[in-house]
Image: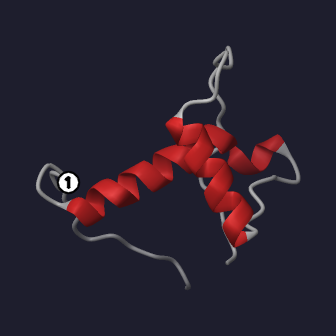
């Protein structure tokens, strides 16, 4: 029926996993664009700069056609 079923999900500690830390930083940065802090910071921080850089370099569009598309916090990014 085309549905994905997750059987096992495990949390991983990123303390000693550099790749997991990079993935966490990347997703947190993009999240700052999709869900900007309210109120916005006076000066952009490192995550804001990284997010803008990644979006600019990849050409990813993080704009939704409507806010309802983000209701479940899922975003489809086409590269």
Q: Nearer the viewer, residue 23 or 53?
A: 53
Furthest residue toward right: 65
Q: How many marks?
A: 1
Q: Residue at x 78, y 62 (%)?
A: 61
Rate crowding at label 1 as few (under 14), some (14 to 19) or many (20 or more) other CA atoms within 10 Å: few
Give the quarter of the image for residue 54. bottom right
| Residue 41 in the image, given as x and y percentages of width and height | 63, 18
Image position, residue 69 (x, y; %): 75, 51
Say if 24 sits above or below 47 in the image: below
Seen from the viewer's position, the closer of residues 5 and 71 is 71
- In which quadrant of the rendered image does the C terminus lie? bottom right
In this view, the residue farthest toward the left is: 16
Residue 29 visible somewhere in the drawing:
yes
Asked if residue 46 lies left or right of residue 17, the reply is right
Q: Residue at left 64%, top 21%? A: 43
Q: Is 39 located above or below residue 1 in the figure?
A: above
Tell me where residue 63 appears, x and y as whole percent. Answer: 81, 52
Q: Is residue 62 left or right of residue 48?
A: right
Q: In the image, what residue occupies the spot 14% across and 49% down?
A: 15
Residue 9 shows up from this direction: no
Q: Residue at x 41, y 49 (%)?
A: 25
Position of residue 47 measured from the top left corner of the image (x, y, whole percent): 52, 40
How does the figure colour the protein chain or chains?
A: secondary structure
| Quadrant of the drawing holding the N terminus | bottom right
Give 1 or 12, whichever is nearer the viewer.
12
Compared to residue 33, the image places residue 55 above or below, namely below
SS class, disc 1: loop
Residue underneath mark 1: 11
């Amino acid at each position: 029926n085309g549905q994905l079923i997750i059987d096992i999900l495990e949390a991983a500690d990123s303390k000693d996993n550099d790749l997991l830390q990079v993935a966490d930083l990347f997703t947190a940065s993009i999240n700052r664009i999709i869900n900007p802090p309210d109120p916005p910071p006076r000066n952009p921080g490192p995550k804001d700069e990284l997010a803008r850089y990644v979006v600019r370099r990849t050409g990813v569009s993080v704009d939704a056609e409507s806010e309802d598309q983000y209701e479940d916090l899922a975003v489809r990014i086409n590269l």
